Structure formats: structure tokens, C-alpha cells
Image (cartoon, rainbow, N blue to C red):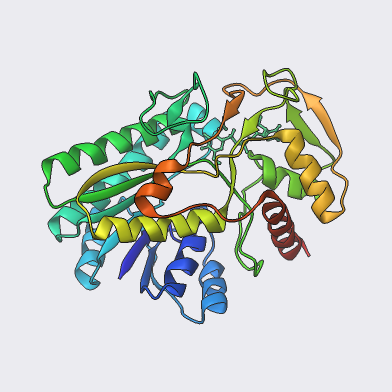
Amino acid sequence: MILLTGGAGYIGSHTAVELIEAGYDVLIADNFYNSRPEVLDAIEEITGKRPALEEIDVCDVEKVDAMFEKYDIEAVLHFASYKAVGESVEKPLMYYRNDLDTLITVMEAMKKHGVNNLIFSSSATVYGVPETVPLVEGMPTGCTNPYGWTKYMSEQIIQDVCHAEADMSAVILRYFNPIGAHKSALIGERPNGVPNNLMPYITQVASGIRPHLNVFGDDYDTPDGTGVRDYIHVVDIAKGHIAAVQYAMSHKGAEVVNLGTGNGYSVLDIVKAFERVNGIKIPYEIAPRRAGDIAQCYADPTKAEKLLGWKAEEDLDAMCKDAWEWEKNITK
Ligand code: UD1
């Protein structure tokens, strides 16, 4: 059985679907802090199989221990964490407490119960303000906000445990910018309140929830002056986890791997692609730069292909189409 902490969330739920379709038994541990129980129904509708569920907080040592007793867990995919950059600046202790505590609690239970395979959700945010792009895994790291530091520190904790425990195997996945949704439009991203990220904001403008998009800065050193990112379809990200689990189960030690496409698109590229693919105008206004934003961030995805045999397959048009199909499904 594969345990997904935070498995009802955006990336966790897509990964649960891909795991079930690849023949794995899936156990989701989630406290529904930023997700909903109905996600389990959607996963069942897509795959024909309902994942096992433990509704617990994975900071709860006793409940996590009992869960590891109850199920035969072969590998852990650790998604459970807080993820809003702005909120982490306002409430750093909340972020350090939760995002480090969940990881340490899960890793202690793994050690106690002899579970040796861990896949961890890290982020391209650990590259800080990059000097050059594309980003290669060995490049310097450093962060600009507490959320980023939790990922940085978590990576270090995992590396240290793998160093100390010869049987341990971990794949640390640095996600670039996951967008889009499952083709069924039954699962997708559901931000609370005003979206922080670009694509959920665009889909809410498209559905009339918000009047226009604010483009944060048009004076960056990029081809059209707006920020450039490596947007990647969430189903590709999910498939990257399957490859990572298979790798972890047949190797020892820790590996850090970028999950990106290697393509950089600007904010205006995304707006234009969304408009063309979906036939909807996205009104936008140029606004000041957002604090902490960088000009460009995109992956060198070579290591993922060499080590895991994984490569992103979906293009930007599919990402825009699938994001919109999902938004229409939840706002209808
Ligand atoms: C953000 C986080 C990053 C996190 C990632 C998770 C920040 C500074 N960084 O990445 O740590 O790992 O989300 O998905 O929050 N944009 C607009 N208008 C908007 C929203 C965004 O112009 O309303 C622009 C941004 O300036 C940026 C691009 O769109 O150039 C992408 O922004 P976003 O989707 O928030 O992702 P990141 O900032 O790359």
C-alpha cells in the first residue's frame, strides 16, 4: 500500500488517480484542512476504486503510529503541508511548526515501522533568486520566505536521515508551476478565497468571479517584460511521482529531481494561450511587481528523464483547456 499524506489535495489527488490506475493500493491521510472529503468520491468515479482514508492530522504522533500499525505501507508520498507564500510571511511559526512537524512525525513512524521509501514534495522556490536559468539540481539554493525555508529545511532533514540510515531511500521532487486539472474535470485545484497563483486567478476571471487579472510587473528582464515560469500539467507531475516511487523502491539514498518541462512561458503567453484555446477574453491590467517575485524560473528536466525515465508530455494548450474545464465544472 502507498500512503499519501495530504492525498486529498491538488497534487495528491491527481497522484492518487495515477497510482490506482498503475495498479497500486492507495491510502490517503488527510485532515481536510485545505481539501474536501468529496475528492475521494471523484477519485473513485475516475478509477472505479476508492482509496482507503484515515482522517487524521499527520502531526499527531499516536494516530500516525496507529495508522502505520494498521496498514502494510511500502512507501510514503508526503504532500501534507501549508503552501501559501504570503501567509507564511505573516505566520512563520505556524508554517515551521506544521510543515516540519508533519515531515518529522511521518519519518519517525517510517523508521519505527521499517518503511524505507519516501517521496517528498519540494519546490523550485528553494532555488531562491537564480543567477542563471535553466535550473539544474546541483545549483545553489536559498529562499526568500518561510514557506520556501520549510522546503529547504525539509530537504536537509531528509538528506540527513538518508545519510544516517543505510536502508532509507528518498526522492525529493522540486515542482515547478503545476497547473491544469484531470481530463475528467472531476478533480482540480480549489483555492480558498482570492487565488495567489496565476492560473486559478485566470480561470476565475474567465468565469466572471473576478473582473480582471493583475499582471504583476511588465518591466522584468524577459522577452515581453512579464515573469517567466515553467508551467507543467498536474497530471504530468502526478506521473512523475509514479516514476519516483518505482525508483525509490529499487535504490537507496536521497536524490533531488526537478519536475518541470524545461519551457519558460511569460504571464502574457499564458493569457494569450488561454484566450486562444478557450475562446474567452481575459481582461488584464499591468500592476506593480509582487514582492519576492523573480524574473525567470524554469527547469533543466534532464535528470528526471535520465534517472526516473519520466518526461512531461502535456503542452500549454492542454493545461489551459483542462484548467478551464475544471473551473466550469465547479462554478456551474
Ligand atoms: C508561487 C510561489 C512559490 C510556490 C508556487 C506554488 C510566490 C512568490 N511564489 O510561485 O513559492 O512554490 O507558487 O505553485 O508566491 N502573476 C500575476 N498575477 C497574478 C498571479 C501571478 O501576474 O494574479 C504572475 C507572477 O508575478 C509570476 C507568475 O504569474 O510571474 C506565476 O505566479 P504564481 O502562479 O503565483 O507562481 P510563482 O510565483 O512562480
85 relative position to 286: left or right: left
Above or below, 218 relative to 229: above
Residue 97 spot, x, y in % from top left = 34, 37
Q: Quadrant of the C terminus?
A: bottom right
Quarter-of-image position of residue 318: bottom right
Above or below, 220 relative to 74: above
Above or below, 102 relative to 37: above
Between 209 and 113, the one nearer to me in the picture: 113
89 relative position to 93: left or right: right
187 relative position to 68: left or right: right
Residue sitting at the far bottom = 48
Residue 240 spot, x, y in % from top left = 44, 55
229 relative position to 266: left or right: left
Residue at point 39% right, 34% down?
137
Between 157 and 241, the one nearer to me in the picture: 241
Q: How many marks?
A: 0
Residue at point 25% right, 60% down?
249
